[in-house]
Image (cartoon, grey):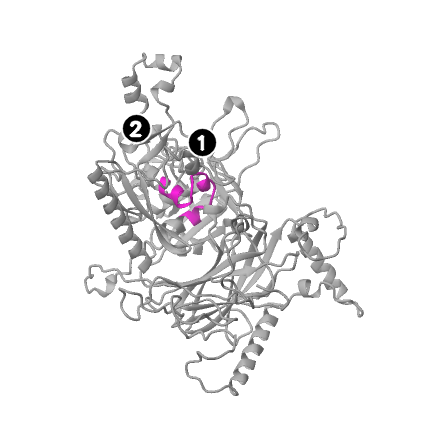
Amino acid sequence: MGRRYRRPAANKDPKKEEERQGRRIGGKKPAPESELGVSKGERSRSRSRLGRAGKKGRKNKKEKKLPSVGLFVTKELNIAIETTKATVERIARECRAKNKRFRDSEFDLEYDTFRCLHGYSEMAEAIGKDVQRVTEIFSKPVFFPEGGAVHSASIRQGSLGDCYFLSALATVSGLPGLIEKICVARDEAVGIYGFIFYQDKGWVSVVVDDMLYTNIPQYESLDREAKGIYHEDKEKFESMARKGGQVLIYAKAGTSNETWVPLIEKAYAKLYGCYAHTEGGQTREAIEDLTGGVATNLNARDILDTDRFWKEELSRVNKDRLFACAFDDVDAPEDAPWQTPTVQGLIGGHAYAVLRAAEVNGKRFVILRNPWGQSEWNGAWSDGSKEWTPEWLKFLPELKHSFGDDGQFVMEYKDFLRYFTDIDRVILFNNTWTVASCWLTVPITPIPSAPAYGTLSFHVNIPKKTNAIFVLSTLNDRSYRSLENDVNVTFEFSVVEVGDLLPLGTGAPDRPFSRSGALEIELEAGDYVVYVKLDQSRKLDPSSDYADWNVPFRTYPDITNPSSLVVSKILTSKVKALSLVQNWDGVGEADYLVKSLEEVIKDDLDEMNGDDNDSDFETDDESGSDSEDGGEKSSSAPAADASAGPKPEDGAVATTGELPPTPGGEGGETVGEVTVPVPDGSDSDDSDEEPSAIEWVDLLEDKGEEVALGLRVYTQTKDEPALVTGRIKSADETWEW
């Protein structure tokens, strides 16, 4: 299962009770496998990178200026920025007219505390004792530091288990000007702030007020002894105890008056519904949310050539990629189970930011940061260690490091690889990149079946030779992760050029059941098919799983291990053995003797060749719009406008690529996204059927019958994205979808 980094439970030793952040917990995901139907009206979109105007460099061949990296530039980014700025300006203007500060009715910490803190089944563990505005907490608040850029040293984790997000903030702040692009608009006098984040559907806007949770109660709530400490002087209590960033219960900017850290944390909580939904996660996914980049994870044990990894990957940190790291929790000693062991000062299950990588005086160093703002590495090259001889101390400025318990520390590269097994990497894009995507709902077989290709595939047209990144993922479910999933899904995918039998490359999640898997590859112009192999994990209980099925009553055997992964593997082994028996009745053949990837490709080629032969007998029709054939759309055809034109016939697919012009846009320009209807496969034409009054219950209860999967294809083809077409193929025509 995927792991999340979060704050652990309090220490079990009452004498040493303290809050820690960073325990890793299992991730949750939906899942699929098998059979029929194309999904219901699924979203299909293409986002085009737009060039950013900039100063022209000098014509010097030796100093060729490369496009700068940063936020993933799409038209949606420009729209999100302009929308956020306009919203902030409009609200600020209205507030001034009413002589009121802004109060966010959608995320009101004071009057709607429960909803802001807690999810459907998740509760925030640390709850503030009061709510104060920024201007009440700080005497002279500043959003960003005066006269300078943001710095990772400003970030301090509070009582919320979101070390992964704060490590992402520290990592992103290493690229000059990047954080400033995320915080796009504000009016500090009125108390309104606008941010942008990247989601499955592109860039979105989040606006918040300046109310924050604090850990110091009001004077009237103090007991007699506490009041006595301040000589029962309320004004002294207010000025001493309820002022400064240290009163914040969640993230803060150290001891400074900076407010960007707690406010962007609040905006992130609003993005996902509540503070509880931000506890526990992966740093790489948070960096994706902040930048629109593509994230992968690498186990340091799997690195083949560490010298190559340094030169081609880690040394490029803050150039076109960002890094973070972690390692698993360390088990407590048997004679002291309440302890939480550290490794040379490092904390297991806790996220660290990689700030820099530098080769100095013949040695390779990695500079890292703990989002707590303290608790550092105490091994070789730690602050004040014996390695720092007078000769080496003079290289501290080159490493941009100084001694002090501020959470930042230096490790030699070999020690970094030895102690940090999980390395997160996020690729950032310049404005030469574009992306096309297609999302489909895939049906899942309700039985423990073997992992197999054939149900889901995507056709991809690449317009010209390019570097490409294929990303297959489930939906980002953080905003509704409180809802339990009955099924988890994992997958593998292979990219095959049309006409070939062998894949050019294969991608998969870095950990089973992680949210996404990626493949980086160089491709020529042409047509490709992405074949997806699906696997699922569910807890088997035949008595309840098939209670609604029209099957005769029977008793079921006790299942010692109810994991479908275990049961399906055993059943596959048994069916393979039985297949040697000449008079075998074939029970389980379809589900456990699955086709290989090569066999699936051959079937597709045979089908394509059959379609080509059939076309010789079809009537001439240049547009093809009157064809009744339910086959796949041509990969070269642009997606239809969802707001006009006939609905595709049964068998049509979701497509993204070239999009029709939108009002206000230039003709022929590729724009944001378009929804192409995908038929549900039903023969019923009753479109007036009233929705069920309990339809919301079906959404609330995941029955493990389907999963949404999307393929994103990033190409370095400027304003000419790939064209992506999804297909769901059924082997059992008795299924209806």
> Residue 407: image x %, image y %?
38, 35
- Residue closer to the observer: 571 or 370: 571
Q: How many marks?
A: 2
Which residue type carries mark 1? Ala
Query: Is 620 in front, or is 307?
Result: 620
Q: Residue 39: horizontal and vertical position, in percent?
A: 52, 63
> Residue 126 — which label?
1
- Is residue 490 left or right of 405 when viewed as pictured? right
User: Please, what secondary structure does the residue beneath circle 1 have?
Assistant: loop
Q: Is residue 303 left or right of residue 251?
A: right
> Residue at 32% across / 24% down in the picture?
242
Disc 1 residue crowd, few under 14, some 14–19, many 20+, Cα 10 Å: some
Q: Residue at x 44, y 80 (%)?
A: 624
Instruction: Classify residue 606 by image quadrant.
Output: bottom right
**Disc ID at residue 27:** none
Q: Classify mark 2: helix, strand or loop.
A: loop
Image quarter in which the C terminus is found:
bottom right
Residue 365 visible within the image: yes
Q: Which residues are magenta?
A: 266-286
Q: Nearer the viewer, residue 324 or 395?
A: 324
Task: Give the dominant element type of the magenta stretch: helix, strand or loop.
Answer: helix
Going by the numbered disc 2, the residue's amino acid type is: Gly
Measured along the vertical axis of the image, is residue 534 above or below residue 165? below
Residue 276 is inside the magenta segment? yes
Label 2 crowding class (10 Å Cα cut-off): few <14, some 14-19, many 20+?
Answer: many
Q: Nearer the viewer, mark 1 or mark 2?
A: 1
**Is 284 in the magenta?**
yes
Tell me, for residue 244, which label it has, or none: 2
